[in-house]
């Protein structure tokens, strides 16, 4: 499995310019942003704008410009670290007013996951968008560009003891599994050779067959997904692994979200 964040919500240049200020730097004057340096806190600023719009007489375009110093320039008053912006977001999540986080989105490339995982993942619909590699239009024959279908092997198959008395004393779970994968490839190739179109030949491909997808999800939906699919919460190993990879990618660019994945 490979998971990479490929895009996320960015504030527009026009919006950012509303709370820039001029600063003397040597003999020149530069426009600097006092709260959103080098792209940091952009999504926090967006969340703050959405949250404060619900409670402030200010226009959405005025909130960060007029309240940015208060929220990003002061330490949190709840004693839990970060800024007042962090405190406000913590308060909003605790009070279940999380619709304000739906404006923050992340787009991921997810590669090499099983069709079994895909079936579980796409049960999460509200707040998610998917573009999935097609088994109809992508050919998975041994002689095609794909070189045949790839597949995911569960750790339990790799670690299972040999099956005594099932086939013979030397048969392992891994051997059984890999043999079925080879048979599926042979069946697919045979059906295609007989003129069966790829959209019908794919019927013999297993749940283990790997696929790639692009997924966009808003922060509220992602936090809900993580709470349901994280390790130790009864989720199957592969989707629990995906939940952790998604969390890691988001926290890497937005450290302020780390607490909300706990």
Image: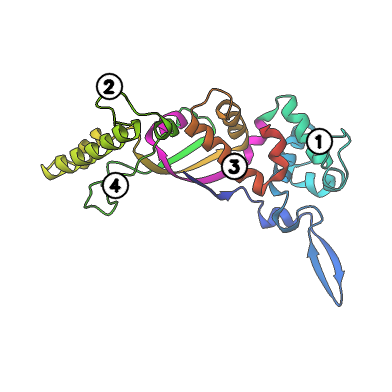
Q: Residue 165 shows which numbered tag?
A: 2
Q: Residue 160 shows which numbered tag?
A: none
Residue 115 belongs to the span the image colors magenta: yes
Q: What span is in magenta?
A: 99-121
- In space, the residues marked 1 and 3 are separated at their CA atoms by 21 Å
Work out whether mark 1 precedes mark 3 in sequence or the reverse, and give the earlier one: 1
Q: At numbered mark 4, what does the secondary structure look like: helix, strand or loop?
A: loop
- In space, the residues marked 4 and 3 are separated at their CA atoms by 29 Å
Mark 1 or 3: in front is 1
**Above/below status of 227 relative to 112:** above
Query: Where residue 46 appears, x then y in whole percent?
Result: 70, 44
Q: Are marks 4 and 3 in contact (CB under 8 Å)?
A: no
Residue 173 belongs to the span the image colors magenta: no
Q: Residue at x 24, y 52 (%)?
A: 144
Residue under pointer 4: 138
Quarter of the figure with the C terminus: top right
Q: At numbered mark 3, what does the secondary structure look like: helix, strand or loop?
A: strand
Q: At numbered mark 1, what does the secondary structure look like: helix, strand or loop?
A: helix
Residue under pointer 3: 105
Work out whether mark 4 precedes mark 1 in sequence or the reverse, and give the earlier one: 1
Q: Is residue 83 left or right of residue 151?
A: right
Q: Residues within 10 Å of mark 2 (few under 14, many from 20)?
A: few
């Amino acid at each position: 499995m490979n998971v990479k964040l490929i895009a996320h919500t960015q504030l527009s240049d026009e919006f950012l310019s509303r709370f820039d200020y001029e600063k003397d730097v040597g003999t020149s004057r530069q426009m600097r942003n006092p709260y959103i340096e080098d792209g940091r806190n952009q999504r926090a600023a967006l969340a703050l704008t959405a949250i404060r719009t619900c409670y402030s007489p200010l226009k959405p375009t005025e909130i960060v410009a007029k309240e940015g110093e208060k929220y990003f320039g002061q330490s949190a008053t709840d004693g839990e670290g970060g800024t007042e912006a962090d405190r406000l977001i913590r308060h909003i999540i605790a009070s279940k007013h999380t619709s304000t986080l739906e404006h923050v989105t992340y787009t991921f490339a997810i590669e090499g996951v099983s069709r079994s995982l895909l079936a579980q993942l796409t049960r999460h619909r509200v707040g998610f968008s998917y573009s999935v590699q097609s088994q109809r239009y992508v050919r998975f024959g041994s002689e095609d560009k794909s070189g045949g279908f790839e597949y995911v092997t569960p750790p339990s198959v790799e670690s299972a003891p040999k099956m005594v008395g099932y086939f013979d004393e030397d048969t392992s779970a891994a051997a059984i599994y890999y043999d079925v994968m080879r048979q599926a490839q042979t069946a697919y190739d045979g059906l295609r050779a007989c003129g069966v179109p790829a959209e019908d030949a794919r019927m013999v491909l297993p749940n283990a067959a790997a696929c790639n997808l692009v997924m966009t999800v808003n922060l509220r939906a992602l936090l809900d997904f993580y709470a349901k699919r994280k390790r130790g919460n009864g989720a199957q190993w592969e989707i629990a692994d995906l939940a952790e990879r998604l969390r890691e990618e988001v926290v890497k660019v937005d450290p302020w979200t780390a607490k909300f994945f706990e």
